[in-house]
Image (cartoon, rainbow, N blue to C red):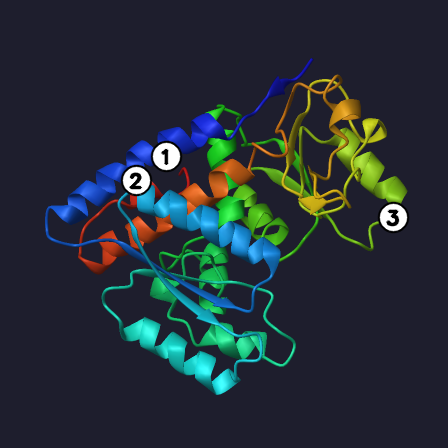
Amino acid sequence: MAVQLSGVPVAQKMRRRIQAGVEQLHQIGQIPTMGIVRVGARPEDVSYELGATKQAQSLGIAVSRILLPSDVEERQLLEILREVNVNKRIHGCLLFRPLPAHLNTYVVLGALSSEKDIDAMTGASMGGLILPVMEAFPPCTAAACLELLDFYQISLPGKHVTIVGTGAAVGMPTAVLLMNLGATVSACNVLTEPKRLLDLCQESDIIISAVGKAGLIGREHVRPGQIVIDVGVSFDNQGKMHGDVNFAQVEPVVKAITPVPGGVGAVTSTVLSAHTVAAALRANGLTGKENLEIPE
């Protein structure tokens, strides 16, 4: 039976670090504030927004929500983001994606200041992960994976990690972060042949799956001694949440595995709060990077 890598104690430990930063800001009369910009009302966006807002407010972080209709004009959205950039009371901003089809995603994301980009939405922030000449925040879910691995003292240098799914929000940045920490990374995408995917998964020390396809990783993909991090989320017709990993098949075989729900997802919104406080500390010329961001 595998050890279950719950995200709950990880988030609890992070909350203590965040609260220390919040107290530091309160001492100088500053309230860390997260801006949330949502276009439309996709159920998954609304659900995440509610959870992130509740999490932030419980930590003493204010939330400024800007809710726009799905048919908002691009020029109006760009103007709102420019206002967020110059608003000194908003320290970090989350813009929900994907955006409606009539909006140019790259133009819109390019309008956000990288200093307020707390989820690596801009090209500058993503580039900062590869060339760390600037203090860029990684995507929250990617950072949550590393927080979880660090909490459970899972060593990365020299380990072979297979990442299933290479999206810009999770798979691709997670691969970069892992390589920066000395891991050997294999990345699989929709064009990876099933046999090759099978071989890479079986050969790896750690599997991270971030596709959003229930049951993608089964018994045939794993072997004893492995660590499995399930980032994927999907819902069946009854509204039940599933991960990418067939938990019933994989859990009896591997060394450790994250549950869904209750694994990486339990950490992600906490990372968002941590990034907001770190951005507020930076904006006020204070330190806090070493305590509030991903493990070094």
Q: Does residue 78 appear to the left or right of 2 in the view shown?
A: left
**In the rendered view, would you say 288 is above or below 77?**
above
* Residue 139 rendering spot, x and y as whole percentages: 50, 53
Q: Quarter of the image for the C terminus: give it.
A: top left
Q: Which residue is mark 1?
A: 14
Query: 219 or 90: nearer the eye?
Result: 90
Q: Which residue is mark 2?
A: 18
**In the rendered view, would you say 287 is above or below 198?**
below
Query: 105 or 143: nearer the eye?
Result: 105
Crowd class of label 1 (few under 14; some 14 to 19; many from 20; radius 10 Å): many
Q: Does residue 88 appear to the left or right of 9 in the view shown?
A: left
Asked if labels 1 and 2 touch by Cβ distance under 8 angstroms, the answer is yes
* Residue 233 rendering spot, x and y as whole percentages: 66, 44
**Residue drawn where x is 61% and y is 31% of the image:** 159
Q: Which residue is mark 3?
A: 193
* Residue 209 rendering spot, x and y as whole percentages: 69, 41
Crowd class of label 2 (few under 14; some 14 to 19; many from 20; radius 10 Å): many
Q: Is residue 274 visible?
A: no
Which residue type does callout 3 highlight?
A: Glu
Asked if labels 2 and 3 touch by Cβ distance under 8 angstroms, the answer is no
Q: Does residue 52 appear to the left or right of 211 in the view shown?
A: left
Of callouts 3 and 2, which one flags the residue occurring earlier in the amino acid sequence?
A: 2
Q: Secondary structure at mark 2?
A: helix
**Residue drawn where x is 41% and y is 72% of the image:** 112
**Residue drawn where x is 41% and y is 37% of the image:** 295
Q: Secondary structure at mark 3?
A: loop
Which residue type does callout 2 highlight?
A: Ile
**In the rendered view, would you say 134 is above or below 260?**
below
Of callouts 1 and 3, which one flags the residue occurring earlier in the amino acid sequence?
A: 1
Q: Gap between marks 2 and 1, in whole Å? A: 6 Å
